[in-house]
Image: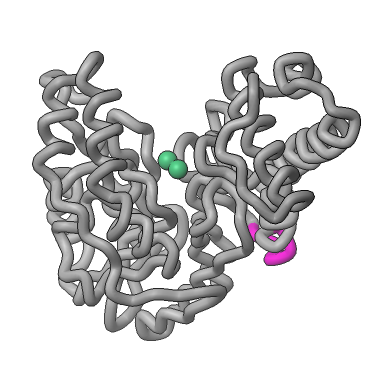
Amino acid sequence: MSENGLMAVAGGWVELDSGVFRLVAEPFRLNVGLIVGKERAVLVDTGASLATGQELVSRARTVTALPLGAINTHSHFDHCFGNGAFDAQVIWSHRLCADHLRWDGLEHRREAVAQLRSGNVAAAQELAASPVVSAGCLLEERAYLDLGERMVTLIHPGRGHTDNDVAAWLADVRLLFAGDLVEEGEAPSFEDSYPLDWPDSLGVLLALQPARVIPGHGQVVDPVFVRQQQTDLQKLADLCRDGFRNSRRPSEMDEETVLPARTARTAIGRAYSQLAAESSGVWVERQPG
Ligand SMILES: [Zn+2]
Ligand SMILES: [Zn+2]
């Protein structure tokens, strides 16, 4: 976090491969990507505030003068509330990401501001002043961005961290920007997740055979790390299917996961909601703890 508590970009761009850069936006350890082709460039995620988005654009301008667009990996504020620094027509996201921002974006901002206010007043004010802008270019499953002698494949591998995750795949250098489908340094976040689908979605990404994977937060990882996360998520899904079948209470099951107790409770609750919806056809938002 910057000294005055504002959201800030820490350090400069690190070139991961030719024309592919990463930097870290604080205070959320957010990995932001910059992918440069011969004719265009795109940012992967726009940061948690308008000011961060504007700073990211000016940082990108130290690397390239080409027309600059952006990709939203999903609808969580830390990844896309810098969208106001762009014209919506040059931002790509999943259709549901745009829907969430349009329908729930102000509520999402209000909740995030309330959470931040206790620990980081300056960041909370910065977020409160950021417009909610949804992407103008939408995909369902895949989209191909031709940056000029460089193709970026945008892939929605299925539900996982949210229902609108998009990964950016660079086949030429075998680099994958995975958004929060992959989390390094902390447990994955399950608040809006689909734990039963998440392992299969990671399987789709692993099938690409990436050499390196840039998570939404934390250090760059290799496929072995992603496979371990997939295994952990599969065990969680299996535990929940079994527990649901046997009417076990989620509070009995926390310690049977590799997750911290509070995270496990959220994850199991989400999985149980999915299972209840599967069996009744009705989505139940909250299960008894
Ligand atoms: Zn997220
Ligand atoms: Zn995130």
Please tell me whether residue 208 belongs to the stretch shown in magenta: yes
What's the residue at 17%, 64% (across, down)? 86
What's the residue at 30%, 52% (across, down)? 80
Residue 14 showing in the rendered view: no
The quarter of the rendering in which ligand 2 is drawn is top left
Residue 123 versus residue 52 in the image, above or below: above
Q: Nearer the viewer, residue 220 or 122?
A: 122
Q: Position of residue 101 (x, y in %)?
A: 31, 56
Residue 149 versus residue 289 in the image, above or below: below
Q: Which residues are magenta?
A: 206-210
Q: Position of residue 14 (x, y in %)?
A: 36, 47
Color theme of the render:
one colour
| Magenta residues, dominant SS class | loop
Q: Position of residue 77 (x, y in %)?
A: 31, 44
Q: Nearer the viewer, residue 96 or 121?
A: 96
Residue 268 showing in the rendered view: yes
Q: Nearer the viewer, residue 151 or 11?
A: 151
Residue 199 versus residue 243 in the image, above or below: below
Q: Position of residue 67 (x, y in %)?
A: 20, 76
Q: Nearer the viewer, residue 268 or 67?
A: 268
Please tell me whether residue 103 belongs to the stretch shown in magenta: no
Q: Quadrant of the C terminus?
A: top right
The quadrant holding residue 182 is top right
Residue 109 versus residue 131 in the image, above or below: above
